[in-house]
Amino acid sequence: MVVKWIVGDLLTGQRIQTVPVISGTWRDTLNDAGALSCTVTLRNEQVRRLGLQESAKPGKAFLAAIEGDLVLQAGPIWIHDFDNDTGRLTIQASGMWSYFDHRVLIPVLAGFLPSSPSADTNLTSSLQGIARTLVAQARSHTGGAVPVILPAAIAGTNVRNYGGGDLGIVGERLRELTQVENGPDIRFQPRLRPDKTGIEWVMQIGTPTQPLLFSQVRPTFTIGLDGSSVSRLRIKADGTRLAGRGFASGGRAADDVLVAVSEDATLGVQGFPLLEVVDSSHATVSRIETLQRYAAEVTTLGRRPLETWSVRHETAQRPFLSGFTVGDFAKVRVRNNLYLENRDHSMRIISRSGDNRGRSVDLELQPEVI
């Protein structure tokens, strides 16, 4: 099915117009914004009449890729790229997560500066509840109530203290929550409004009992047999983050730099030499308990090379595009392969992408970690 492209108002989600494109791509990525873009020709009188310079204005409008009633990707437009020689305009957008990459983590400023203690955000909840609160607080500012549907908060004992003077970015703080040990998946899932007049985004967050977001039905893909819907298999195994010992450095507590250490014997018992990894991306963390979870995640992920498969799946065959999404687990049947074991592999879909023709989808998968 051909993919339809629409633009609309970012603040309300209201659809403005459908855009006839000559090409387009979209990409959905686990625990990140994803992206989409389309190219139109302004030599077409119908396209010129749309007034895309205004109706698709960067920072004010959204772009959406839709197949039937399924919204494949949608989010703020950030870039226009016009080539006068060809008369072509490329509109570039990212998923709704990218909006929160443009929001500072502070409460509503009622006459005080971000450096004031009153501008701090101090939270005790589950990681799910903390993620929800960060987005709810961003939406509470004047002009910040983009059409994101929030889940009910789940209580918990996790602690996060965000100083207003740090001028942290909401989107980055959300990513950090996904990166701790047993951190929740987070997704801003676009969908058509019930009346189909626009787009809204549902914030989905993993829970303390099930931090991963996935559907209960596992699609099956077959590689290596005649007539298979899957082709273009590529495999990359990356051992640069293998770790028997992991360090995570944070901010300061009582003028001392916080450092957490985690050790894991998995590689050692397999005969690997000692390999160490340092994660120094948490300069704002001031609690050793939080930092320890980052260090533990370093050694959990470092137990094996990071293996990523990329394939192309023809969407005219099962499983259809509506039957799986990013985060889902899949059974991949491998036959007649020179590199992989010829058996069924349990994999997780970490990205999917496609184009305006809608005939195929490119998938990236990683082995399920048990």
Image (cartoon, helix red, strand yellow):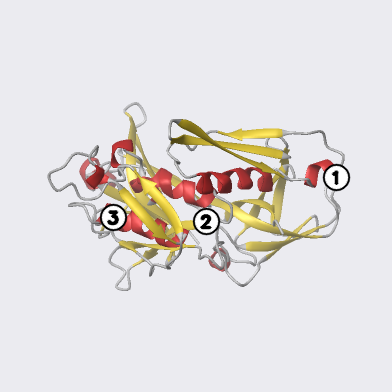
Q: Is 177 drawn above or below residue 280 in the view shown? A: below
Check disc 2 and give the amino acid type.
Gly
Residue 108 visible to the viewer: yes
Find residue 290 and name its label. Answer: none
x and y percentages locating residue 239 in the rendered image: 73, 36
Left or right: 339, with 250 as reference point: right
Determine whether the residue tagged by mark 3 lies in a helix, strand or loop: helix
Check disc 3 and give the amino acid type.
Gln
Please name the residue shown 45% across and 35% down the image: 251
Please name the residue shown 29% across and 46% down the image: 120
Q: Quadrant of the C terminus?
A: bottom right
Asked whether the residues under the numbered discs 1 and 3 touch, taking CB atoms below 8 Å apart as contact, a structural biologist would say no
Find residue 358 and name its label. Answer: 2
The total number of labels drawn is 3
x and y percentages locating residue 88 in the rendered image: 35, 35
Q: Nearer the viewer, residue 288 or 254?
A: 254
Find residue 137 and name its label. Answer: 3
Q: Nearer the viewer, residue 103 or 354?
A: 103
Disc 2 versus disc 3: distance between alpha carbons? 37 Å
